[in-house]
Amino acid sequence: MTEPTIRKSVYLKADPQTVWDHLTRADLLGKWFHRADQDLREGADFTLSNVADGDRMCWGRVEEMQPIHYMRWSFTVGPLNGEMTTVEWRLEPAIGGSRLSLEHSGLPQDAEGFGLVLALDKGWHGFLLNLHEQ
C-alpha cells in the first residue's frame, strides 16, 4: 500500500507572477483560500484563518521558496493534532497562462485517518478551482 499523497494541477489564465502573488500575498490568499496573518516568506511561520469568522484553519512554516517557481510548507490542520504534513507548490508558464501543481504528502496512513485525506482532497480541489475566478 502506498502512502496517501494528494496531487492536483490546474491551468490558469494568468502569468506565473500573478499566480505566485496569489500564493504568497496575505491580501490575495483570502480571496481563494484562507486569510493569512502576513505575506508568506521563507523561514516564517504562518497562520491561515477562515474568511467568514476569523477562526484559525491551518498553520505551518514556509520551508523553502524559489520565487515564482516553487514553494514548500510544513502544514497542519486541527484534526491532525499538531502532526505536520508537507505541501509543495510548483508553478510553470504555459501557453496563455500558467500551470500550478500541488502535492500534499505526509498524510495519515491508517483507515481512521482516511476520512481526513478525503476531506483535504476535496478542499484542495475546491480551493484550486477558486483560483480560476481570480
Image: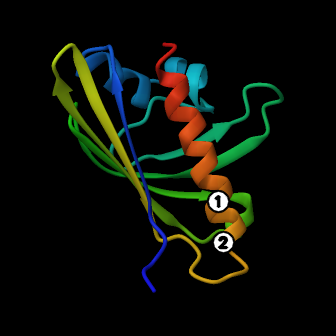
Secondary structure beneath label 1: helix
Disc 1 target residue = 118
- Measure the C-alpha gap from mark 1 to mark 2: 6 Å
Query: Could you tell me if the residues under marks 1 and 2 are in contact, i.e. CB atoms within 8 Å?
Result: yes
- Residue at the image position 73 percent from the left and 26 percent from the top: 51
Residue 45, horizontal then vertical, whole percent: 49, 49
Secondary structure beneath label 2: helix
Q: Is residue 130 above or below residue 3?
A: above
Residue 34 appears in the figure: yes
Depth check: give the residue in front, 7 or 56: 7
Q: How many marks?
A: 2
Q: Is residue 96 above or below residue 79?
A: above
Relative to residue 111, is residue 40 drawn left or right?
A: left
- Residue at the image position 45 percent from the left and 29 percent from the top: 39
Residue 29 appears in the figure: no
The amino acid sitting under disc 1 is Leu
Residue 32, horizontal then vertical, whole percent: 57, 24
- Residue at the image position 42 percent from the left and 23 percent from the top: 22
Residue 112, horizontal then vertical, whole percent: 73, 79
Depth check: give the residue in front, 94 or 89: 94
Residue 50, horizontal then vertical, whole percent: 73, 33
Disc 2 target residue = 114
Q: Check disc 1: other Cα within 10 Å, few if <14, some if 14-19, many if 20+.
A: few
The amino acid sitting under disc 2 is Phe
Q: Check disc 2: other Cα within 10 Å, few if <14, some if 14-19, many if 20+.
A: some
Q: Quadrant of residue 93?
A: top left
